[in-house]
Image (cartoon, coloured by chain):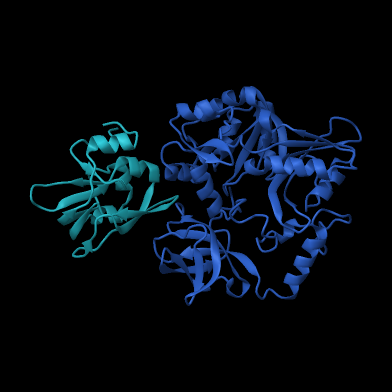
Amino acid sequence: MTLKETALHAEHAKLGASFTDFGGWDMPLKYQSELAEHHAVRQGAGLFDLSHMGEIWVRGAQAAAFLDYALVGNLSAIAVGKAKYSLICTPEGGIIDDLISYRRPALVDGEDAYLVVPNAGNADAVYAEFVTRSEGFDVELDNVSAQTSLIALQGPESERILLSQVPAEQAEAVRELKYYAATEVTVAGLPILLARTGYTGEDGFELYIDNSEAALLWNALLTADETVTPCGLASRDSLRLEAAMPLYGNELGLEGNPFEAGLGPVVSLPPAKTAKEGDFVGKEALAKIKAERAESLSGKRVLVGLQGQGRRAARGHYPVLLNGETIGEVTSGQPSPTLGYPVALAYVSAEHAEPGTELQVDLRGKAEPFTVVALPFYKRPANK
Amino acid sequence: MTKVVPELRYSAEHEWVAADGDGPVTVGVSAVAAEALGDIVYLDLPEVGSTITSGESCGEIESTKSVSDLYAPVSGEITEINNDAVGDPAVVNQDPYGAGWLFKVKVSEEGPLLSAAEYAEKNGAEL
Protein backbone atom coordinates (compact mmCIF):
# COMPACT_ATOMS: atom_id res chain seq x y z
CA MET A 1 0.00 0.00 0.00
CA THR A 2 1.26 3.46 -0.86
CA LEU A 3 0.91 6.01 1.90
CA LYS A 4 -0.72 9.32 1.08
CA GLU A 5 1.37 12.45 1.47
CA THR A 6 0.21 15.92 2.47
CA ALA A 7 1.13 18.99 0.45
CA LEU A 8 3.75 19.72 3.14
CA HIS A 9 5.57 16.39 2.96
CA ALA A 10 8.64 17.86 1.28
CA GLU A 11 8.81 20.59 3.96
CA HIS A 12 8.83 17.96 6.69
CA ALA A 13 11.57 16.00 4.94
CA LYS A 14 13.64 19.20 4.66
CA LEU A 15 13.28 19.67 8.43
CA GLY A 16 14.61 16.17 9.03
CA ALA A 17 11.34 14.64 10.19
CA SER A 18 10.99 10.95 10.89
CA PHE A 19 7.74 9.71 9.41
CA THR A 20 5.08 7.26 10.48
CA ASP A 21 1.97 5.71 8.97
CA PHE A 22 -1.07 7.40 10.47
CA GLY A 23 -4.48 6.48 9.06
CA GLY A 24 -2.89 5.68 5.70
CA TRP A 25 -0.88 8.90 5.60
CA ASP A 26 2.90 9.28 5.75
CA MET A 27 3.01 11.86 8.55
CA PRO A 28 5.83 13.46 10.55
CA LEU A 29 6.19 11.66 13.87
CA LYS A 30 8.79 14.08 15.20
CA TYR A 31 11.48 16.37 13.88
CA GLN A 32 14.10 16.23 16.64
CA SER A 33 12.92 15.32 20.10
CA GLU A 34 9.23 14.70 20.80
CA LEU A 35 9.75 15.87 24.38
CA ALA A 36 11.17 19.20 23.21
CA GLU A 37 8.22 19.56 20.83
CA HIS A 38 5.79 18.82 23.67
CA HIS A 39 7.35 21.44 25.93
CA ALA A 40 7.43 23.97 23.07
CA VAL A 41 3.62 23.80 22.83
CA ARG A 42 3.15 24.15 26.60
CA GLN A 43 5.58 27.05 26.85
CA GLY A 44 5.78 28.74 23.44
CA ALA A 45 4.27 27.65 20.17
CA GLY A 46 4.22 24.51 18.07
CA LEU A 47 3.35 24.14 14.40
CA PHE A 48 1.54 21.00 13.24
CA ASP A 49 0.61 19.68 9.81
CA LEU A 50 -2.89 18.23 10.15
CA SER A 51 -3.64 18.06 6.44
CA HIS A 52 -4.48 14.39 6.76
CA MET A 53 -7.74 15.40 8.45
CA GLY A 54 -10.82 15.40 6.25
CA GLU A 55 -12.90 18.42 5.19
CA ILE A 56 -16.47 18.06 3.94
CA TRP A 57 -18.65 21.03 3.00
CA VAL A 58 -22.33 20.63 3.72
CA ARG A 59 -24.47 23.28 2.02
CA GLY A 60 -28.07 23.83 1.13
CA ALA A 61 -31.49 24.77 2.44
CA GLN A 62 -31.48 21.73 4.72
CA ALA A 63 -27.80 21.62 5.64
CA ALA A 64 -28.57 22.21 9.32
CA ALA A 65 -31.45 19.73 9.36
CA PHE A 66 -29.26 17.13 7.65
CA LEU A 67 -26.47 17.47 10.23
CA ASP A 68 -29.02 17.31 13.06
CA TYR A 69 -30.06 13.97 11.59
CA ALA A 70 -26.60 12.65 10.67
CA LEU A 71 -24.78 13.60 13.90
CA VAL A 72 -25.71 13.20 17.58
CA GLY A 73 -25.41 16.94 18.29
CA ASN A 74 -27.81 19.81 17.71
CA LEU A 75 -25.91 21.51 14.90
CA SER A 76 -28.77 23.78 13.83
CA ALA A 77 -28.55 25.47 17.25
CA ILE A 78 -25.04 26.83 16.75
CA ALA A 79 -24.52 30.34 15.44
CA VAL A 80 -22.78 31.28 12.22
CA GLY A 81 -19.07 31.60 13.02
CA LYS A 82 -19.16 29.03 15.80
CA ALA A 83 -17.98 25.43 15.90
CA LYS A 84 -19.18 22.34 17.68
CA TYR A 85 -17.59 19.04 18.65
CA SER A 86 -19.86 16.11 17.83
CA LEU A 87 -20.04 12.42 16.96
CA ILE A 88 -21.38 10.40 14.09
CA CYS A 89 -22.87 7.18 15.41
CA THR A 90 -24.27 3.97 13.97
CA PRO A 91 -27.97 3.12 14.49
CA GLU A 92 -26.72 0.92 17.39
CA GLY A 93 -24.97 3.84 19.06
CA GLY A 94 -21.40 2.85 18.13
CA ILE A 95 -19.07 5.73 17.28
CA ILE A 96 -18.05 6.04 13.60
CA ASP A 97 -16.01 9.18 14.27
CA ASP A 98 -15.67 12.25 16.40
CA LEU A 99 -15.58 15.47 14.40
CA ILE A 100 -15.81 19.25 14.49
CA SER A 101 -18.39 21.19 12.47
CA TYR A 102 -17.94 24.88 11.70
CA ARG A 103 -21.03 26.88 10.78
CA ARG A 104 -20.04 29.28 8.02
CA PRO A 105 -21.84 32.16 6.30
CA ALA A 106 -24.07 30.91 3.49
CA LEU A 107 -23.06 31.60 -0.10
CA VAL A 108 -26.70 31.84 -1.14
CA ASP A 109 -29.68 33.34 0.70
CA GLY A 110 -31.91 30.75 2.30
CA GLU A 111 -29.12 28.20 2.56
CA ASP A 112 -26.77 27.12 5.33
CA ALA A 113 -23.14 26.09 5.14
CA TYR A 114 -21.03 23.93 7.42
CA LEU A 115 -17.48 22.68 7.17
CA VAL A 116 -17.22 19.28 8.82
CA VAL A 117 -13.79 17.95 9.82
CA PRO A 118 -13.49 14.20 10.43
CA ASN A 119 -10.36 12.28 11.42
CA ALA A 120 -7.92 11.17 8.72
CA GLY A 121 -8.57 7.46 8.93
CA ASN A 122 -12.35 7.95 9.08
CA ALA A 123 -12.81 10.66 6.45
CA ASP A 124 -13.94 8.27 3.71
CA ALA A 125 -16.28 6.38 6.05
CA VAL A 126 -17.83 9.64 7.26
CA TYR A 127 -18.32 10.93 3.72
CA ALA A 128 -19.91 7.63 2.65
CA GLU A 129 -22.29 7.81 5.64
CA PHE A 130 -23.11 11.43 4.82
CA VAL A 131 -24.02 10.44 1.25
CA THR A 132 -26.33 7.70 2.55
CA ARG A 133 -27.87 9.83 5.28
CA SER A 134 -28.42 12.82 2.98
CA GLU A 135 -31.07 10.98 0.99
CA GLY A 136 -34.27 13.03 1.08
CA PHE A 137 -32.50 16.19 2.31
CA ASP A 138 -32.01 19.29 0.16
CA VAL A 139 -28.28 19.35 0.74
CA GLU A 140 -25.08 19.33 -1.26
CA LEU A 141 -21.98 17.48 -0.03
CA ASP A 142 -18.53 18.44 -1.20
CA ASN A 143 -15.58 16.39 0.01
CA VAL A 144 -12.63 18.78 -0.31
CA SER A 145 -10.25 16.72 1.85
CA ALA A 146 -7.84 16.06 -1.02
CA GLN A 147 -7.26 19.72 -1.87
CA THR A 148 -7.38 21.23 1.62
CA SER A 149 -4.44 21.61 3.98
CA LEU A 150 -4.75 22.19 7.70
CA ILE A 151 -2.01 23.73 9.80
CA ALA A 152 -2.27 24.19 13.56
CA LEU A 153 -0.38 26.75 15.61
CA GLN A 154 -0.73 25.82 19.27
CA GLY A 155 0.63 27.22 22.51
CA PRO A 156 0.50 30.28 24.78
CA GLU A 157 2.49 32.36 22.26
CA SER A 158 0.35 31.40 19.26
CA GLU A 159 -1.89 34.51 19.28
CA ARG A 160 1.09 36.84 19.41
CA ILE A 161 2.85 34.97 16.62
CA LEU A 162 -0.24 34.76 14.43
CA LEU A 163 -0.85 38.50 14.86
CA SER A 164 2.60 39.21 13.42
CA GLN A 165 1.33 37.71 10.14
CA VAL A 166 -2.10 39.38 10.08
CA PRO A 167 -2.84 42.86 8.64
CA ALA A 168 -3.38 45.50 11.34
CA GLU A 169 -7.06 46.00 10.45
CA GLN A 170 -7.73 42.31 11.14
CA ALA A 171 -5.82 42.11 14.43
CA GLU A 172 -8.87 42.86 16.53
CA ALA A 173 -10.87 40.08 14.87
CA VAL A 174 -8.12 37.59 15.71
CA ARG A 175 -7.80 38.79 19.32
CA GLU A 176 -11.55 38.66 19.79
CA LEU A 177 -11.93 35.23 18.21
CA LYS A 178 -13.40 32.95 20.88
CA TYR A 179 -12.56 29.32 21.54
CA TYR A 180 -14.50 27.10 19.11
CA ALA A 181 -15.14 29.92 16.66
CA ALA A 182 -13.81 30.61 13.17
CA THR A 183 -13.38 33.58 10.85
CA GLU A 184 -11.82 34.43 7.52
CA VAL A 185 -8.58 36.40 7.74
CA THR A 186 -5.40 37.00 5.80
CA VAL A 187 -2.29 35.36 7.20
CA ALA A 188 1.06 36.01 5.52
CA GLY A 189 -0.88 37.49 2.62
CA LEU A 190 -2.90 34.30 2.13
CA PRO A 191 -6.67 33.83 2.54
CA ILE A 192 -7.30 31.59 5.53
CA LEU A 193 -10.22 30.10 7.36
CA LEU A 194 -8.94 30.58 10.88
CA ALA A 195 -10.40 28.60 13.78
CA ARG A 196 -9.59 28.90 17.45
CA THR A 197 -9.58 25.18 18.07
CA GLY A 198 -7.00 22.55 18.81
CA TYR A 199 -6.08 19.24 20.33
CA THR A 200 -3.30 20.16 22.74
CA GLY A 201 -4.99 21.71 25.78
CA GLU A 202 -3.42 25.08 24.95
CA ASP A 203 -4.70 28.21 23.32
CA GLY A 204 -4.18 27.92 19.62
CA PHE A 205 -5.41 28.14 16.07
CA GLU A 206 -6.16 25.87 13.17
CA LEU A 207 -5.73 27.30 9.68
CA TYR A 208 -7.45 25.89 6.61
CA ILE A 209 -5.89 26.68 3.25
CA ASP A 210 -5.75 25.35 -0.29
CA ASN A 211 -2.94 22.82 -0.88
CA SER A 212 -1.31 25.09 -3.45
CA GLU A 213 -0.52 27.69 -0.77
CA ALA A 214 0.10 25.41 2.20
CA ALA A 215 3.89 25.48 1.99
CA LEU A 216 3.91 29.30 1.84
CA LEU A 217 1.78 29.46 4.98
CA TRP A 218 3.77 26.75 6.78
CA ASN A 219 7.08 28.50 6.16
CA ALA A 220 5.71 31.94 7.03
CA LEU A 221 4.53 30.67 10.41
CA LEU A 222 7.64 28.57 10.99
CA THR A 223 9.89 31.60 10.53
CA ALA A 224 7.55 34.16 12.13
CA ASP A 225 9.22 33.83 15.51
CA GLU A 226 12.10 31.89 16.97
CA THR A 227 9.81 30.17 19.48
CA VAL A 228 7.85 28.38 16.74
CA THR A 229 8.77 24.69 16.81
CA PRO A 230 7.61 22.20 14.18
CA CYS A 231 5.82 19.38 15.97
CA GLY A 232 4.95 15.85 14.91
CA LEU A 233 2.31 13.34 15.85
CA ALA A 234 4.28 11.99 18.81
CA SER A 235 3.98 15.25 20.73
CA ARG A 236 0.42 15.75 19.48
CA ASP A 237 -0.46 12.47 21.19
CA SER A 238 1.25 13.24 24.50
CA LEU A 239 -0.31 16.73 24.54
CA ARG A 240 -3.83 15.48 23.87
CA LEU A 241 -3.44 12.76 26.49
CA GLU A 242 -2.45 15.28 29.18
CA ALA A 243 -5.52 17.29 28.19
CA ALA A 244 -7.57 14.03 28.30
CA MET A 245 -8.91 14.50 24.80
CA PRO A 246 -10.11 11.20 23.35
CA LEU A 247 -8.40 9.64 20.35
CA TYR A 248 -10.50 7.69 17.89
CA GLY A 249 -9.35 4.07 17.91
CA ASN A 250 -8.12 4.33 21.50
CA GLU A 251 -10.89 5.81 23.65
CA LEU A 252 -13.57 5.91 20.96
CA GLY A 253 -14.74 3.23 18.53
CA LEU A 254 -17.61 1.33 17.04
CA GLU A 255 -17.76 -1.05 20.02
CA GLY A 256 -18.15 1.69 22.60
CA ASN A 257 -20.72 4.40 23.25
CA PRO A 258 -20.51 8.12 23.97
CA PHE A 259 -21.71 7.90 27.59
CA GLU A 260 -18.99 5.60 28.88
CA ALA A 261 -16.41 7.86 27.19
CA GLY A 262 -17.67 10.85 29.18
CA LEU A 263 -19.23 12.35 26.05
CA GLY A 264 -22.85 12.15 27.21
CA PRO A 265 -23.29 15.95 27.00
CA VAL A 266 -22.39 15.79 23.30
CA VAL A 267 -25.51 13.70 22.62
CA SER A 268 -28.49 16.06 22.27
CA LEU A 269 -31.06 13.97 24.12
CA PRO A 270 -33.49 15.26 26.76
CA PRO A 271 -33.20 16.70 29.35
CA ALA A 272 -30.17 18.53 27.90
CA LYS A 273 -30.72 22.17 26.99
CA THR A 274 -29.46 21.34 23.51
CA ALA A 275 -31.89 18.41 23.08
CA LYS A 276 -33.31 18.27 19.57
CA GLU A 277 -36.84 17.37 18.61
CA GLY A 278 -36.31 15.32 15.50
CA ASP A 279 -34.92 11.92 14.77
CA PHE A 280 -31.20 11.29 14.37
CA VAL A 281 -29.20 8.20 13.53
CA GLY A 282 -28.60 6.27 16.74
CA LYS A 283 -31.22 8.18 18.75
CA GLU A 284 -33.20 5.18 19.91
CA ALA A 285 -30.17 3.11 20.88
CA LEU A 286 -28.43 6.03 22.59
CA ALA A 287 -31.57 6.95 24.55
CA LYS A 288 -31.78 3.36 25.75
CA ILE A 289 -28.10 3.24 26.75
CA LYS A 290 -28.48 6.56 28.56
CA ALA A 291 -31.58 5.40 30.45
CA GLU A 292 -29.94 2.13 31.46
CA ARG A 293 -26.87 3.93 32.76
CA ALA A 294 -29.03 6.42 34.65
CA GLU A 295 -30.77 3.52 36.37
CA SER A 296 -27.62 1.66 37.34
CA LEU A 297 -23.98 1.73 36.34
CA SER A 298 -23.43 -1.71 37.80
CA GLY A 299 -21.39 -3.84 35.40
CA LYS A 300 -20.87 -0.91 33.03
CA ARG A 301 -17.57 0.73 32.19
CA VAL A 302 -16.41 4.31 32.56
CA LEU A 303 -13.41 6.13 31.12
CA VAL A 304 -11.15 7.34 33.92
CA GLY A 305 -7.77 8.96 34.38
CA LEU A 306 -5.00 7.05 36.11
CA GLN A 307 -1.88 8.49 37.68
CA GLY A 308 1.10 6.17 38.12
CA GLN A 309 2.78 6.02 41.53
CA GLY A 310 6.04 4.81 40.04
CA ARG A 311 7.96 5.82 36.94
CA ARG A 312 6.81 3.09 34.58
CA ALA A 313 4.02 4.02 32.21
CA ALA A 314 0.90 2.03 31.42
CA ARG A 315 0.27 1.53 27.71
CA GLY A 316 -2.77 0.84 25.57
CA HIS A 317 -4.48 -2.54 26.19
CA TYR A 318 -2.71 -3.23 29.49
CA PRO A 319 -5.11 -4.78 32.06
CA VAL A 320 -6.25 -2.65 35.00
CA LEU A 321 -6.40 -4.67 38.22
CA LEU A 322 -7.93 -4.54 41.66
CA ASN A 323 -6.43 -7.10 44.04
CA GLY A 324 -5.28 -9.21 41.13
CA GLU A 325 -8.63 -9.21 39.37
CA THR A 326 -8.97 -7.51 35.99
CA ILE A 327 -11.48 -4.67 36.20
CA GLY A 328 -10.58 -2.70 33.11
CA GLU A 329 -8.19 -1.88 30.31
CA VAL A 330 -5.87 1.01 29.50
CA THR A 331 -6.70 2.85 26.26
CA SER A 332 -3.82 5.36 26.18
CA GLY A 333 -0.84 5.77 28.46
CA GLN A 334 2.46 7.60 28.55
CA PRO A 335 4.85 9.33 30.88
CA SER A 336 3.48 12.90 31.10
CA PRO A 337 6.24 15.29 30.04
CA THR A 338 4.57 18.27 31.71
CA LEU A 339 3.60 16.63 34.98
CA GLY A 340 6.56 14.28 35.38
CA TYR A 341 4.62 11.12 36.20
CA PRO A 342 2.89 8.45 34.10
CA VAL A 343 -0.72 9.13 33.09
CA ALA A 344 -3.24 6.89 31.39
CA LEU A 345 -6.82 6.79 30.24
CA ALA A 346 -8.58 3.52 30.96
CA TYR A 347 -12.00 1.95 30.89
CA VAL A 348 -12.80 0.46 34.32
CA SER A 349 -15.98 -0.91 35.82
CA ALA A 350 -18.03 1.92 37.26
CA GLU A 351 -17.68 0.62 40.84
CA HIS A 352 -13.99 1.55 40.78
CA ALA A 353 -14.14 4.86 38.92
CA GLU A 354 -14.10 7.30 41.86
CA PRO A 355 -11.09 9.63 42.00
CA GLY A 356 -8.80 8.45 44.77
CA THR A 357 -9.43 4.76 44.13
CA GLU A 358 -6.19 2.79 44.32
CA LEU A 359 -5.84 0.35 41.43
CA GLN A 360 -3.01 -1.44 39.70
CA VAL A 361 -1.97 -1.81 36.09
CA ASP A 362 -0.40 -5.01 34.86
CA LEU A 363 2.86 -3.71 33.41
CA ARG A 364 4.04 -6.75 31.51
CA GLY A 365 3.47 -9.18 34.35
CA LYS A 366 4.09 -6.83 37.28
CA ALA A 367 1.19 -5.10 39.05
CA GLU A 368 2.17 -1.46 39.57
CA PRO A 369 0.10 1.02 41.64
CA PHE A 370 -2.04 3.62 39.86
CA THR A 371 -4.60 6.00 41.35
CA VAL A 372 -7.85 7.13 39.71
CA VAL A 373 -7.66 10.92 39.27
CA ALA A 374 -10.02 13.59 37.94
CA LEU A 375 -9.64 14.61 34.29
CA PRO A 376 -8.01 16.39 32.61
CA PHE A 377 -4.53 15.60 33.90
CA TYR A 378 -3.32 18.98 32.71
CA LYS A 379 -5.27 22.22 32.47
CA ARG A 380 -3.69 25.39 31.16
CA PRO A 381 -3.57 28.43 33.45
CA ALA A 382 -6.92 30.23 33.37
CA ASN A 383 -5.59 33.60 32.21
CA LYS A 384 -4.24 32.16 28.95
CA MET B 1 26.42 11.32 13.57
CA THR B 2 28.09 7.93 13.53
CA LYS B 3 25.41 5.40 14.14
CA VAL B 4 27.59 2.34 14.40
CA VAL B 5 30.94 2.40 16.17
CA PRO B 6 33.45 0.13 14.37
CA GLU B 7 35.28 -1.00 17.52
CA LEU B 8 32.17 -2.48 19.13
CA ARG B 9 30.22 -5.67 18.58
CA TYR B 10 26.44 -5.83 18.51
CA SER B 11 23.52 -8.12 19.26
CA ALA B 12 20.70 -8.50 16.76
CA GLU B 13 18.53 -6.79 19.40
CA HIS B 14 20.60 -3.58 19.18
CA GLU B 15 22.79 -3.86 22.28
CA TRP B 16 26.47 -3.08 21.87
CA VAL B 17 29.31 -4.78 23.75
CA ALA B 18 32.70 -3.23 24.44
CA ALA B 19 35.48 -5.54 25.59
CA ASP B 20 37.93 -4.00 28.02
CA GLY B 21 40.93 -6.33 28.26
CA ASP B 22 40.15 -9.27 30.51
CA GLY B 23 37.77 -7.28 32.71
CA PRO B 24 33.99 -7.05 32.54
CA VAL B 25 32.48 -5.92 29.23
CA THR B 26 30.40 -2.76 28.97
CA VAL B 27 26.92 -2.96 27.44
CA GLY B 28 24.68 -0.26 25.98
CA VAL B 29 22.13 0.21 23.23
CA SER B 30 23.05 1.37 19.74
CA ALA B 31 22.28 4.81 18.35
CA VAL B 32 20.05 3.04 15.82
CA ALA B 33 17.92 1.72 18.68
CA ALA B 34 18.02 4.95 20.70
CA GLU B 35 16.81 6.90 17.70
CA ALA B 36 14.05 4.42 16.92
CA LEU B 37 12.83 4.48 20.51
CA GLY B 38 12.62 8.27 20.70
CA ASP B 39 13.15 10.13 23.96
CA ILE B 40 14.08 7.58 26.60
CA VAL B 41 12.47 8.30 29.97
CA TYR B 42 13.00 5.20 32.10
CA LEU B 43 15.54 2.40 32.45
CA ASP B 44 15.01 -0.83 34.32
CA LEU B 45 18.45 -2.44 34.57
CA PRO B 46 19.51 -5.76 36.10
CA GLU B 47 20.84 -5.62 39.66
CA VAL B 48 24.52 -5.76 40.49
CA GLY B 49 25.39 -9.34 41.42
CA SER B 50 22.56 -10.86 39.37
CA THR B 51 23.19 -13.21 36.50
CA ILE B 52 21.96 -12.55 33.00
CA THR B 53 21.59 -15.02 30.15
CA SER B 54 22.45 -14.21 26.58
CA GLY B 55 19.39 -13.71 24.40
CA GLU B 56 17.04 -13.30 27.36
CA SER B 57 15.35 -10.14 28.59
CA CYS B 58 17.30 -8.53 31.43
CA GLY B 59 15.51 -5.20 31.75
CA GLU B 60 13.41 -2.57 30.06
CA ILE B 61 14.00 0.62 28.21
CA GLU B 62 11.05 2.97 28.09
CA SER B 63 10.54 5.95 25.81
CA THR B 64 7.67 8.40 25.68
CA LYS B 65 6.00 6.28 23.00
CA SER B 66 6.87 2.71 23.84
CA VAL B 67 8.65 0.23 26.01
CA SER B 68 11.15 -2.35 24.83
CA ASP B 69 12.88 -5.28 26.44
CA LEU B 70 16.56 -5.01 27.02
CA TYR B 71 18.20 -8.26 25.93
CA ALA B 72 21.39 -9.64 27.38
CA PRO B 73 24.00 -9.78 24.62
CA VAL B 74 26.20 -12.05 26.76
CA SER B 75 25.77 -14.35 29.76
CA GLY B 76 27.43 -13.54 33.06
CA GLU B 77 27.30 -11.60 36.29
CA ILE B 78 26.44 -7.90 36.50
CA THR B 79 29.30 -6.04 38.17
CA GLU B 80 28.12 -2.44 37.78
CA ILE B 81 25.20 -0.43 36.46
CA ASN B 82 25.20 3.14 35.20
CA ASN B 83 23.28 4.98 37.91
CA ASP B 84 23.73 8.30 36.14
CA ALA B 85 21.77 6.95 33.19
CA VAL B 86 19.09 5.55 35.50
CA GLY B 87 18.74 9.02 37.03
CA ASP B 88 18.72 10.81 33.68
CA PRO B 89 17.84 8.36 30.89
CA ALA B 90 18.04 11.15 28.26
CA VAL B 91 21.79 10.56 28.30
CA VAL B 92 21.15 7.32 26.36
CA ASN B 93 19.75 9.40 23.49
CA GLN B 94 22.49 11.98 23.73
CA ASP B 95 25.49 9.68 24.00
CA PRO B 96 24.50 6.03 23.54
CA TYR B 97 28.08 4.78 23.14
CA GLY B 98 29.59 6.92 25.89
CA ALA B 99 27.91 8.41 28.96
CA GLY B 100 24.75 6.45 28.07
CA TRP B 101 26.28 3.00 28.68
CA LEU B 102 24.00 0.72 30.72
CA PHE B 103 25.83 -1.98 32.66
CA LYS B 104 29.00 -4.08 32.96
CA VAL B 105 29.11 -7.86 32.88
CA LYS B 106 31.72 -10.44 33.92
CA VAL B 107 31.21 -12.72 30.93
CA SER B 108 30.72 -16.46 31.34
CA GLU B 109 29.58 -16.99 27.77
CA GLU B 110 29.20 -14.71 24.77
CA GLY B 111 25.97 -14.65 22.87
CA PRO B 112 25.92 -14.55 19.11
CA LEU B 113 27.35 -11.11 18.35
CA LEU B 114 27.64 -9.25 15.08
CA SER B 115 30.59 -7.27 13.87
CA ALA B 116 30.02 -3.55 13.36
CA ALA B 117 29.94 -4.11 9.59
CA GLU B 118 27.37 -6.88 9.87
CA TYR B 119 25.21 -4.85 12.25
CA ALA B 120 25.41 -1.76 10.06
CA GLU B 121 24.41 -3.71 6.97
CA LYS B 122 21.52 -5.39 8.75
CA ASN B 123 20.13 -2.04 9.90
CA GLY B 124 20.87 0.06 6.86
CA ALA B 125 23.23 2.21 8.93
CA GLU B 126 26.58 3.71 8.07
CA LEU B 127 29.85 2.71 9.62
Residue under the point 72% across and 35% down: A183
Q: Is residue A360 left or right of residue A74?
A: left
Residue furthest to the bottom in view is A323
Q: Tell me: A188 left or right of B102.
A: right
Of A268 and A190, the residue lying toward us: A268
Q: Nearer the viewer, residue A319 or A334?
A: A319
Residue A271 versus residue B119 in the image, above or below: below
Q: Quadrant of residue A82?
A: top right
Q: How many marks?
A: 0
Image vertical order of residue A208 relative to residue A83, above or below: above
Q: Position of residue A107 (x, y in %)?
A: 84, 30
Residue most extreme to the left = B22
Colour displayed for chain B in the image of the structure = cyan
Q: Residue at x 40, y 60 (%)?
A: A312
Hue used for the chain lettered A = blue
User: Where does the N terminus of chain A fall, quadrant-wise?
Assistant: top right
Q: Position of residue B73 (x, y in %)?
A: 24, 51
Q: Position of residue A290 (x, y in %)?
A: 76, 66
In the rendered view, does B47 fall on the left or right side of A23?
left
Residue B43 visible to the viewer: no
What residue is rendered at 71% in x and 38% in y?
A: A182
Q: Is residue A71 above or below residue B80?
A: above
Point out residue A282 in the picture as x, y percentages from the top left corner.
Answer: 79, 57
**Residue A233 in view:** yes
